[in-house]
Structure formats: C-alpha cells, structure tokens
Amino acid sequence: MTLEYLLELIHNYSTEDKELIIRAYEFAKVCHKGVLRKSGEPYIIHPLSVACILAEMHADADTIAAGLLHDVLEDCQQITKEDLARTFNPTIAQLVDGVTKMKKNHFNNDKVLTAAANTQKLVRGLGQDIRVIIIKLADNLHNMRTEQYQPPHKQIEHSRETMSLYAPFARLTGAYKLMSELEDLSFSYLDPEGYKEMDDLIKFVAKEYEEEKEQILIEVAQMLNSNNISYNIKSQIKTHYELHRKLLTYGSYDKIHDLYGIRILLDDVESCYSVKAELEMMFKYLEEKGKDYIKRPKTNRYRSLHTSIESPNGYNFQFQINTPEMQMINSYGLPAYWSLFSGQKKEVVAQVMQNDFKRFPCFSILKEMARANQSPESYVRELNNDVLIDKVYVYTPAEDVIELPIGSTPIDFAYKIHSDIGNTITGVLINGQSERLDYKLKNKDVVNILYDLSLLDAKDRPDYTDMCKTEQAKRKIKEHRKTLLLQAD
C-alpha cells in the first residue's frame, strides 16, 4: 500500500477532506518514524494499509484519518487524545481513543484481564460510534493479511482472537465480505490441513460443476433477455471456512443445497419476485430450502430471495436474487452506507449508521450490559455467550423476529422480551403446542410465553437458572432474587 494508492482512492473527496487525510498521514509518519514491522517494512505501512481498506469502503474522511492515526495513542505516549482533538477534530480523537488498547500495567500485568478490559472498552465504544468497530476490523484484517511474518504461536493466538471476536462482529454488522476473509485467513493458520482439504474440494467442485453451471447460466440469461429484464449475474462457491462448517452439518459436499451460489441482481423488488417464480418453473427447486429475506430481512439487514434447485444431473445450486443496493448492504453491512449515501454530509451518514445499528437486536443487549456495571471478565463472558455466538431465529405471535443463541430455551426468550415476563413465566406454547420450559428453540418456532404478573413478588418461584442458555437471563434471575431478598429484609 502506498500514499499514492490512498490518494487515488479518495480522488473524488473534497479538497478539505483530502487535506485532512494527508495531514493525518504525515502526523502518523512522524510518530512511527524509525519503527519497523515484523516484515521489515516501515511501521507507517500498517496504518496506511488500514486507511486504504477503509477508503475502499468509501469511508468518510474522519474515519480514514482515524485509521491512519489508530496506533498513535498506544505507541507514542507523548501524544494525548486532547492533542489529536486540537490538531484534527474531537471526532477523530474519539475514534482513535475508541480503538486504543489499555496497558497491562493498569491491571497488574494480568494479560487475561487486560484483554477482557480492552474488549469491554472496544465494545462500549461502538455503542457510541459504530465506526470504532469498523476501524478495528480494518486493523485486524491487515494484521491477518500479514500474519505470515509472525511466529507460529502468535499466528495461532491472533487467529483465535479473530475467530472469537472480530469475525463475529463483522457478521453482526452485516460485513460478510470482511467476515469471510477474516475467517479464511484464521482458518488457514488454525487448521492448515483442513484449509488445504477445503481448497482441494473447492477446485474439484469448480471443475465438476462447470458444465452444468454454464448451461444453467445460459438458460437463465435467455429467460431474462426474452423478458427484457436488465440483470447482472455471477456465480461463486462457498468460501473455505463456510464449506468446512457446512460439511460438519451435512457430512458430504453433494448434500449442501447452497454449495454453489448464482447471484442475480435486478433493478427492483418486483422483478426479484417474478424472476424467482420463473426460475422455479424452469428447474426442479427444493421448496423447503426457499427463503424470503426481502420480506423478512436478517437482523443485520441482509435482504435477498433464495431458492435452491437440483440440476438434471443432480447438482445443487442456490439462486440469490436481489438488487444492487441490497447486495451492497449484504456484502459490506453498515459500511455500505458510505456508498449509498455518498451525497450526504459525513455527519449525517455517521448518524444514519449509528441510528440503524441501534435497531439491531444486539444493540439493546450491549446497552444493557453497559448499564450492568460488570467486571471485564463477566462482560466478555456475556458478550461471547449471548452476542457473538451462532444464533437461532424465532418469532413472537405478532411475527416479530427474536434472535437468541443456539441452545436457548423459552426462559431465555421470556427474559429477552422483558424481565417481568421472565420473572412471572408459567408456561409456553411453541407453534401452538404446549412445551416444557427447557425446550430448545429451533429456527422458525413461534413462541408464545404464558405468564402471570401477579406472581412478580412471589418468593417461592422455581429457580430457572439451570434451564437458561444466555448470561442475560441468568443475570436477570440473580438480580430479581436479590431484589426479593432485600424486600424480605
């Protein structure tokens, strides 16, 4: 990465914005002067690369400048947050501070506690400004791209951290493109043999499916052209880590219904539905695998129509049908707003991103965790167990989507809705049928909690802690029992 490449990426930014970014580069270059990376390159190459990753997302000037300065407070102790606010602006200073790690000597050189406290600080920061995590993801991505220069034990350490923290946060914000690269890079260090096996399988599938795929693309193009429909079409196989995870579930590649994706981009939503109907008449489609993520988007704003087919020779393909705007959000998540709202002032776009993030299910959990005043270790445990873990998606009777960790029970669901409902639960109906309270929720379940608010102060209620999956529910049960004991005193 070079300054010239960064300037090329921001060539259409305003003169004021370009001057701000160049000043940030010069400032960082002086701060990191004489420092080398493990690769032997000048250290400035790292923040410059982070800034380029952000500029490739069309990030605003403040975010790119913060990317250039993201290591200044940590590595140049003579520079303070106040210095950055005076030299640049308070927003840049706040963003840089948000991604700056705290020192081990703040925690008696306890490495585990320091790591937990830094995670807590980072996550609390994104509650104020989502751009904090986007800068950190760009930072982590460049570090993983250059991980070959690290000793083996550091490669493993960094890859585990990426898999447990950064890749899940990329998924959480809808940044699938970032997530996929982070997962594949980490996978290549954590399981080199497994990565090689997936690489060989991807090459095999590409060759095995080629003739059938090309015939399908021809037939689809003919159908679209005959209907005078404007389109863009692209095919792709699962990434290495995605394929690895799918094989753990399905056992064999030929049983994976979405192994090979064919993405069709159309001008409008109406065309998406009409083309989906045409495709399902043209091919043998797997009805139970169809998904309508346009009417019911995923919680991270992913929108698309999915329909899986079986080709004449028994190969599975999945059509993913959406619009260019949807695909931009599907690939980049919240960072896509920089492109979609490029004509707006940077402050407006930043606020739109933050306001939309506040509507994500995870935001309310993070906000509640921040209020709970937990220790760093407790905070990170709840973050890992409730927020970053794989999810199950269920519905309320009003058809609202509720997102919970896999393995959750109706007790977790009740506390997710409201503490009082959890504290007074008496039973549950799943898809209209009575079920036990330790029932493990499944995707698409409709959950109707039965409760009695007159039991709110009852002191002889069962302790449902062992039936809970989420730390949130366990914490709320503990808080309620503590409140009842105080009332008794």
Image (cartoon, rainbow, N blue to C red):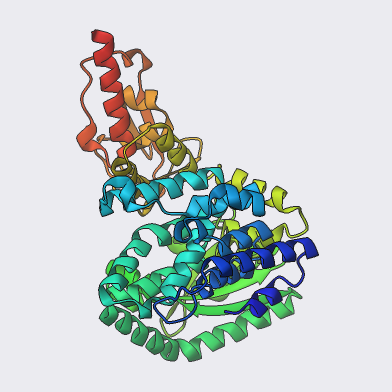
At 51% from the left and 85% from the top, the residue drawn is: 213
Looking at this view, name the residue that lies furthest to the top. 489
Among the 4 quarters of the image, the one containing residue 325: bottom right
Who is closer to the viewer here, 123 or 97? 97
Who is closer to the viewer here, 245 or 275? 245
Q: Quadrant of the C terminus?
A: top left
Q: Quadrant of the N terminus?
A: bottom right
Who is closer to the viewer here, 272 or 406? 406
Who is closer to the viewer here, 256 or 180? 180
Say above or below: 399 vs 188. Answer: above
Among the 4 quarters of the image, the one containing residue 160: bottom left
Q: Where does residue 428 sit, x and y in percent of width and height?
A: 32, 32
Among the 4 quarters of the image, the one containing residue 286: bottom left
Q: Where does residue 450 sit, x and y in percent of width and height?
A: 36, 26
Q: Horizontal placement of 304 versus 248: left or right?
A: right
Kindly tell me whether residue 277 is visible in this rendering. Answer: no
Q: Horizontal placement of 428 versus 6: left or right?
A: left
Say above or below: 51 vs 199. Answer: above
Q: Where does residue 51 sit, x and y in percent of width and height?
A: 59, 68
Q: Horizontal placement of 257 versus 468: left or right?
A: right
Kindly tell me whether residue 103 is visible in this rendering. Answer: yes
At 34% from the left and 87% from the top, the residue drawn is: 200
Say above or below: 70 vs 193. Answer: above
